[in-house]
Image: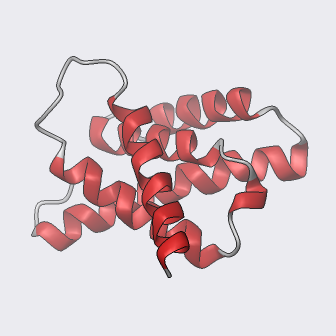
Amino acid sequence: MFKSNLSHYILGYSLSFLLGCVLCNFLFIYFNIPMVLGSSLVGIVGTFIFYKNKEIQAAIYCGSFAGMTDPVLFYSWIELIIISIIGGMILFFLRRSLIGLGGKLGAVAFSSLLTLMLFREIF
């Protein structure tokens, strides 16, 4: 992905995650495309655009999983950015773990959303 340091890796994962999340929500809100179909479209388009980089493909697809959440639960763009940063950090730290096991991307999306919900309840 990026050849530089830790912050560049996390930034790359987070921006890819944010792109997938926003696109999936955008397709649902403005084009009334069902969430699962929208997530699939985002994943396919992300795969073709970033065909050489599997990490970005996975982050976009993971973000689209988080984007399948009901838009009513997001109060602002700041929360989407927070979810993306959390998801990007989790993806970065798990990039060498859970290889070959199904459900990693969905678990990361769920964990980032759960973290935001817990943070919202605490503060």
Left or right of 71: which side holds 29? Answer: right
**Which residue is painted at 46% across and 32% down in the image?**
47
Q: Is residue 75 above or below residue 9?
A: below
In this figure, what is the number of numbered marks?
0
- Give coordinates of residue 64: x percent, y percent: 56, 42
Q: Looking at this rendering, what residue extends furthest in the bottom direction?
A: 123
Residue 87 percent across, percent down from the top left: 38, 55
Q: How is the image coloured?
A: secondary structure
Residue at the farthest front position? 122
- 44 horizontally vs 60: left or right: right
Left or right of 65 in this view: 31: right
> In the image shown, does 57 or 112 lie closer to the viewer?
112
x then y, percent, for residue 85: 38, 66
In front here: 19 or 49?
Answer: 19
In this view of the protein, which residue sits in the foreground, 114 or 104? 114
| 11 sits left or right of 121 in the view | left
Residue at the spot 18% in from the left edge and 41% down from the top edge: 95
Give the vertical position of 89 relative to 69 (above or below).
below
Give the vertical position of 14 relative to 37 (above or below).
Answer: below
**Residue at x 17%, y 24% (from the top left corner):** 99
In percent of width and height, residue 40 lies at 62, 27
- Quadrant of residue 33 within the rendered picture: top right
What residue do we see at 80% from left, 32% from top?
34
